[in-house]
Image (spheres, helix red, strand yellow):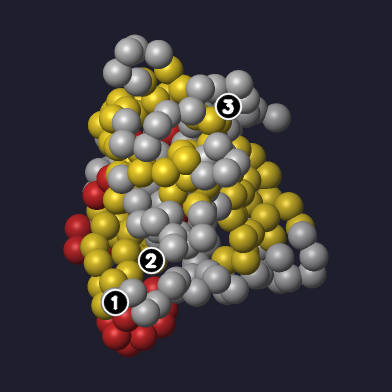
């Protein structure tokens, strides 16, 4: 039976360390804990890397975090040649915060892009230095410069970013919340997590299970590196950190 890991990052994306107990080590050496601050790869956001510290001070390097049989089962994948902990052992967890914080800023930047470009999303991938969102639009009619300027307006306004839970029924009554063309949020669990931007979600709200910074100002300076044509009705926007390079 799949284990349900308590996902501490859902309520507080800023947790850098925590303690947890080992509940299982699977036959491939993947470590399952009662609770974790490690985000598991999903929704276009890569899983966390980091360290587990044992009672004797020795460390286990974690190279990847993935989901198991269900989305609630989180598996920590050690780097090669790491010692394996015993079931019941207490570990101190530490994520690679520098990397995660970049991913949180980038993930929030992807939400801002969907505000500036309100079209059906066909794909997205968040990375530390370059993220992409694909939209189902025949002709962008946008320039990198325009989109960058509108993204930076949202960043400078420093709007709050927060989460809120709604019921399946509330989601069904507001189909416009779902911007993804092919991926539907999981229903049937009773609660759907919305990521909201602006006072009273005035700028945006959409279902998302990822980790984000708590205000648009924290995204910092970003720009559109490229708008690529991917088929007749698909445009790929690439977001990068920093000012737009001068041509
Ligand atoms: Zn998100």
Please, is residue 4 above or below residue 187 in the view? above
Q: Is residue 173 shown left or right of residue 109?
A: left
42 or 234: nearer the viewer: 42
- The quarter of the image holding the N terminus is bottom left
Mark 1 packing: few (<14 Cα in 10 Å), some, or many (20+)? few
| Callout in the foreground (1, 2) | 1
Q: CA distance from mark 1 to mark 3?
A: 36 Å
Sooner in the amino-acid sequence: mark 1 or mark 2: 1
Residue in the image at 57% along x and 66% along y: 121
> Quadrant of residue 130 in the image?
top right
Please, is residue 82 above or below residue 35 in the view? above
Ligand 1 within 8 angstroms of badge 2 C-beta: yes
Residue 43 percent across, percent down from the top left:
51, 56
Label 1 with label 3: CB-CB less than 8 Å? no
Q: Is residue 34 visible?
A: yes
Residue in the image at 59% along x and 49% along y: 125
Residue in the image at 29% along x and 50% along y: 6
Q: Is residue 209 shown left or right of residue 246?
A: left
Ligand 1 within 8 angstroms of badge 1 C-beta: no
137 or 147: nearer the viewer: 137
Q: CA distance from mark 1 to mark 2?
A: 16 Å
The mark found on residue 190 in the picture is 1
238 or 210: nearer the viewer: 210
The mark found on residue 25 in the picture is none
| Callout in the foreground (1, 3) | 3
Sooner in the amino-acid sequence: mark 1 or mark 3: 3
Residue annotated with mark 2 = 206
Q: CA distance from mark 3 to mark 2?
A: 35 Å
Please, is residue 240 above or below residue 67 in the view? above
Residue reaching furthest left? 200
């Amino acid at each position: 039976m799949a284990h349900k890991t308590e996902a501490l990052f859902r309520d507080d994306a800023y947790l850098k360390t925590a303690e947890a107990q080992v509940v299982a080590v699977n036959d491939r050496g993947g470590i399952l804990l009662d609770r974790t601050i490690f985000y598991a790869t999903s929704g276009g956001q890569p899983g966390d890397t980091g360290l587990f510290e044992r009672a004797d001070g020795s460390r286990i390097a974690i190279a990847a975090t993935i989901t198991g049989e269900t989305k609630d089962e989180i598996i920590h994948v050690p780097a090669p040649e790491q010692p394996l902990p015993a079931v019941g052992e207490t570990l101190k967890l530490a994520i690679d915060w520098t990397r995660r914080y970049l991913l949180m800023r980038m993930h929030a930047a992807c939400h801002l892009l969907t505000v500036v470009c309100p079209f059906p999303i066909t794909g997205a991938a968040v990375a530390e230095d370059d993220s992409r969102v694909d939209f189902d639009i025949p002709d962008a009619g946008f320039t990198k410069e325009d989109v960058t300027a509108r993204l930076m307006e949202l960043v400078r306004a420093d709007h709050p970013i927060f989460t809120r839970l709604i019921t399946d029924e509330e989601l069904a009554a507001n189909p416009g919340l779902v911007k993804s063309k092919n991926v539907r949020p999981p229903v049937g669990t009773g609660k759907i997590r919305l990521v909201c931007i602006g006072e009273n979600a005035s700028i945006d709200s959409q279902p998302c299970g990822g980790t984000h910074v708590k205000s648009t100002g924290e995204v910092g300076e970003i720009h559109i590196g490229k708008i690529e044509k991917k088929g007749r009705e698909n445009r790929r926007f690439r977001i990068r950190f920093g000012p737009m390079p001068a041509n």
